[in-house]
Image: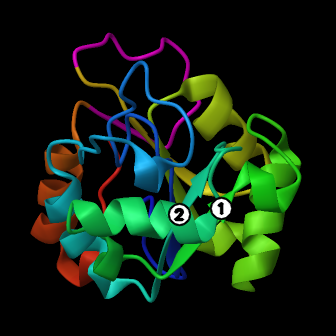
């Protein structure tokens, strides 16, 4: 059985410690941080999922708008792999409010069930995305997976996600 098989049209990426490292002590717009850093495996995961027409970042940022998020991603070479950029500042909702994910879905004009949310925080990224019908991947480096089945897939790294997505036919990610 494939969890992310037919009908998947896009990915909703979390920013902090999922796609980009959340560096302690940084304040203000992300594009103006002295240092920005992609998470290990981020480029490989974005490339593996590039078979999907939409890949967006949806972050709880309140100091940055989508333009500033895109500028920060440009600094680490990830910007060109993404199609849309959303922040709490612009959406008017913050995670873990499920309306955050509903608004992203509306703005993308893609139903939630055709989107896959990828994040590192079970309560902020996975539970609300799942509640609105999105498929979910929880990335937990160096952690024990949660005991309940909140996410469709739990992996230790973005590199593992890239490998699983590339290794299956038709860009489908196998369950487990």
Horizontally, residue 22 falls left or right of residue 152, namely left
Crowd rating for badge 2 (residues with CA inside 10 Å; few <14, some 14–19, many 20+) = some
Q: Which residue is mark 2?
A: 68
Q: Quadrant of the C terminus?
A: top left
- Residue 14 in the image: state x and y as whole percent: 50, 48
Residue 149: image quadrant is top right
Q: Quadrant of the N terminus?
A: bottom left
- Residue 102 in the image: state x and y as whole percent: 82, 61
Local secondary structure at mark 1: loop
Horizontally, residue 24 falls left or right of residue 93, namely left
- Residue 116 in the image: state x and y as whole percent: 53, 61
What number is the disc on residue 65?
Answer: 1
Residue closer to the observer: 174 or 80 = 80
Question: What residue range appears in magenta?
Answer: 142-155
Horizontally, residue 123 falls left or right of residue 19, namely right
Residue 162: image quadrant is bottom left
Crowd rating for badge 1 (residues with CA inside 10 Å; few <14, some 14–19, many 20+) = many
**In the rendered image of this protein, does residue 175 appear above or below residue 71?**
above
Question: Gap in Å between the C-alphas at discs 2 and 1?
Answer: 5 Å
Confirm whether the magenta stretch covers residue 151.
yes
Residue closer to the observer: 173 or 24 = 24
Q: Is residue 165 visible?
A: yes
The residue lying at 73 percent from left, 57 percent from top is 133
Residue closer to the observer: 54 or 134 = 54
**In the rendered image of this protein, does residue 12 appear above or below residue 64?**
below
Q: Are marks 2 and 1 in contact (CB under 8 Å)?
A: yes
């Amino acid at each position: 059985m494939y969890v992310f098989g037919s009908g998947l049209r896009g990915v909703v990426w979390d920013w902090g410690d999922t796609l980009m490292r959340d560096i302690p002590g940084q304040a203000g717009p992300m594009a103006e941080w002295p240092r920005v850093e992609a998470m290990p495996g981020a480029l490989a995961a974005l490339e593996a999922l590039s078979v999907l027409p939409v890949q967006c970042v949806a972050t709880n940022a309140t100091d940055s708008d989508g333009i500033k998020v895109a500028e920060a991603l440009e600094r680490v070479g990830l910007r060109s792999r993404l199609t849309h950029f959303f922040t709490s500042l612009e959406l008017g909702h913050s995670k873990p409010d499920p309306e955050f994910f509903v608004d992203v879905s509306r703005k993308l004009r893609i139903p939630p069930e055709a989107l896959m949310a990828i994040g590192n925080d079970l309560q902020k990224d996975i539970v609300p995305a799942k509640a609105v019908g999105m498929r979910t991947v929880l990335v937990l480096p160096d952690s024990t997976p949660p005991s309940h089945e909140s996410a469709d897939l739990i992996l230790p790294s973005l590199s593992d996600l890239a490998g699983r997505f590339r290794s299956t036919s038709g860009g489908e990610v196998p369950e487990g």
